[in-house]
Amino acid sequence: MKTARVPIAFVPLADAAPLVVAHEMGFAAEEGLAFELVRAPSWSYLRDMLSFGRVDAAHMLAPVPVATALGLGGSAVAMDVLMVLSVNGNVIAVDTPLARRMRDGGHSFAFDDAREAGEALLEATGRRLRIGVPFSFSMHAVLLSYWLSSVGLSAIQGIDIRTVPPPLMAEAVRAGEVDAFCVGEPWGTLA
């Protein structure tokens, strides 16, 4: 059987595991595929590698193919989506001083009332909330905007959504560049 070489870009997240496992365990080879996994430092870098033909496939955030096809944030390139590698698995985290202020304000971090958590977050912030997300065209950004708008805050009014590559989220918090972030694993746990 002839082997087809397939360069595939990925961002190091838990949901890239099916590609890594298929490569490392020989599952891809059994199907006549030689995966060449190319680690990307950010979603925009990954998108550009795929758009300009450096790789043939990529592990991507769900909204990226749509945004790319529309030319949002880069060149308009049509893409086919073949499969979903994960569902859920994201983390919303706040920096330690903000968490302390939330606790001092009575928030229990019981994770059972999203509206109460959003209200506690906004009350404890005391200024425009700076939240890191992996990519501006991501479900992370959409879900954060949806969640915080449920407590009466629009993205324009009080949320500063900043793009931070997943491996740099914890560093962005430590540097005071963001107050909170939403990211896929393992970066939430590592922070």
Image (cartoon, rainbow, N blue to C red):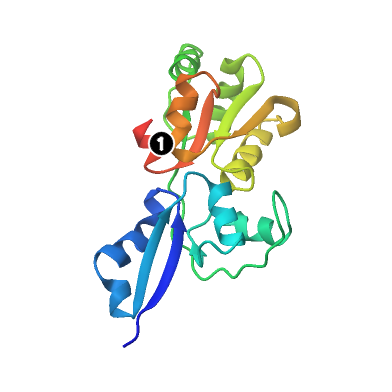
Q: Position of residue 57 (x, y in %)?
A: 50, 65
Q: Residue at x 46, y 14 (%)?
A: 97
- Which picture quadrant has residue 120? top right
Provide residue 46's location: percent of width, then percent of height: 53, 53
Q: Nearer the viewer, residue 170 or 37?
A: 37
Identify whether 176 is placed above or below 163: above
Pinpoint residue 2: horizontal percent, then vertical percent: 34, 85
**Total numbered labels placed on residues in the image:** 1
The quarter holding residue 154 reads: top right
Q: In the picture provided, is 184 more to the left or to the right than 22? A: right
| Residue 46 visible (yes or no) | yes
Q: Whole-percent x and y of residue 144?
A: 60, 38
Residue at 69 percent across and 62 percent down: it is 69
Label 1's element?
Answer: helix
Q: In the figure, 134 relative to 152: above or below?
A: below
Task: State whether residue 94 appears in this view.
Answer: no
22 up-or-down from 186: above or below? below
Q: Residue at x 40, y 54 (%)?
A: 15
Question: On the picture, is 184 further left or further right than 21?
Answer: right
Which quadrant would the N terminus be assigned to in this image?
Answer: bottom left
Please, what is the three-letter code of the amino acid marked with disc 1?
A: Gly
Seen as rendered, the residue at the extreme bottom is 1
| The one of 117 and 144 positioned closer to us in this rendering | 144
Give the camera-side residue of 99 and 4: 4
**Residue located beneath label 1 in the image:** 188
**Would you call the spot at circle 1 few (<14 residues within 10 Å), some (14-19), or many (20 or more)?**
some
Quadrant of the image containing the C terminus: top left
User: Which residue is rendered at x = 65% and y = 38% of the image?
Assistant: 145
Image position of 147 with respect to 71: above or below:
above
